[in-house]
Amino acid sequence: MKDLIIKILREQTDGLQGEFDFDGIPDIDGMPDNEPVSFNKEEIKNKINNLNNFVHRREGLGLQSVIDEILKPIEKPIPEPEKREVMEWLFKLQSHGKFDTRKLNYLIRTLHGTTRVEVDGKWHIVNKLNTHYTLLAELITDLLFESESNDVLQEISESNSNKQLQDILLKNKDLIKNLFIDTFEPYDLVEIADNKLGETDRIGLATENEVVEFLNNKDWGGGNYMKVERQGGDGDFIDMKLATDLIVLFNGRYRTVQVKTSPSQAERFKNDVKSGRYKEVDILVYKESGEIKFVNLNKER
């Protein structure tokens, strides 16, 4: 199975734009040597990718917990100074009505129990792999081909709806889970994440920095500015738990901001908000044709 990891690392990609709970199909040319000619690998991968967060959520394939299990031996607790800074902001957000005391207590308990992967003393992009359904779809496909799970591949190939595909994958949930656990060591996933997700992460950070500069310099009228008080950065607890990239101060109130790099990502986030997710986020910011655009999410709910 080590040969499979080498193949994955050699596959050509310009960065997986699927991101984390978002959209995008990577352009991948690499194919295992034993690929059955009757199956279209790209078609199968795209079908799985189209299931979006079903791939990693608990009620779906549950690969988030599988990836967490693989990475657990190399995870470390969040450093105490970082915990204290996060807790200060959690109390501030709660005092401004972003969530109630019960949610605050839950977040603090979760913070103290949270672990993550660090490389050379820094948070690593592999921590995002567990919800990056585009890359997970690619890995599922590679594992099914490499293990010659032809019956499963045949069913997927013949499926003609997302519901039918979900049923097929749920029926083979244990098989897929075991393929991940038997194939990947923790640092295999670190290497894959470096290779596949690094460019996407750089694009996201560049967009976020651009939004910060824009907000700090835009007069919304009467000398009112959205002053950016906090930018979480890679692996930030508040970002991961509250989908909040930035916290801004505007008219004496803290507002929470999520930043996206494309209209398609923004549209999916809005749909999630309409369905009841991300209740703590006030503002969505995204780029379209080089222009920074804003959405008041409180009007979308």
Image (cartoon, rainbow, N blue to C red):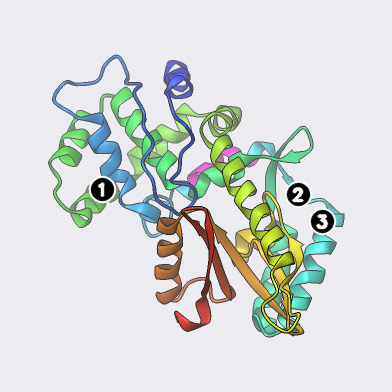
- Name the residue: 43% across, 58% down: 263
Q: Residue at x 51, y 46 (%)?
A: 130
- Report the disc number at residue 77: 2
Residue 28 against residue 174 in the figure, above or below: above
Secondary structure type for disc 2: strand
Q: Amino acid at mark 3?
A: Glu
Residue 82, label in figure? 3
Task: Pinpoint residue 168: horizontal percent, then vertical percent.
Answer: 22, 47
- Real-space Cα separation, disc 2 to disc 1, in angstroms: 35 Å
Query: Tag 1 or tag 3, which sits nearer the N-term?
Result: 3
Mark 2–mark 3 distance (CA, rounded to whole Å): 10 Å
User: Are dots 3 and 1 in contact, CB under 8 Å?
Assistant: no
Kindly report which numbered mark, 2 or 3, lies closer to the viewer in this rendering: 3
Q: Nearer the viewer, residue 23 or 250?
A: 250
Instruction: Categorize mark 3 by other alpha carbons within 10 Å: few (<14), some (14-19), many (20+).
Output: few
SS at mark 1 in the image: helix
- Tell me: residue 16, above or below residue 113: above
Please provide percent x and percent y for residue 93.
72, 77
Q: Is residue 172 visible?
A: no
Q: Which residues are magenta?
A: 65-72
Q: Earlier in the sequence, mark 2 or mark 1?
A: 2
Q: Is residue 41 left or right of residue 78?
A: left
Where the N terminus falls, by quadrant? Answer: top left
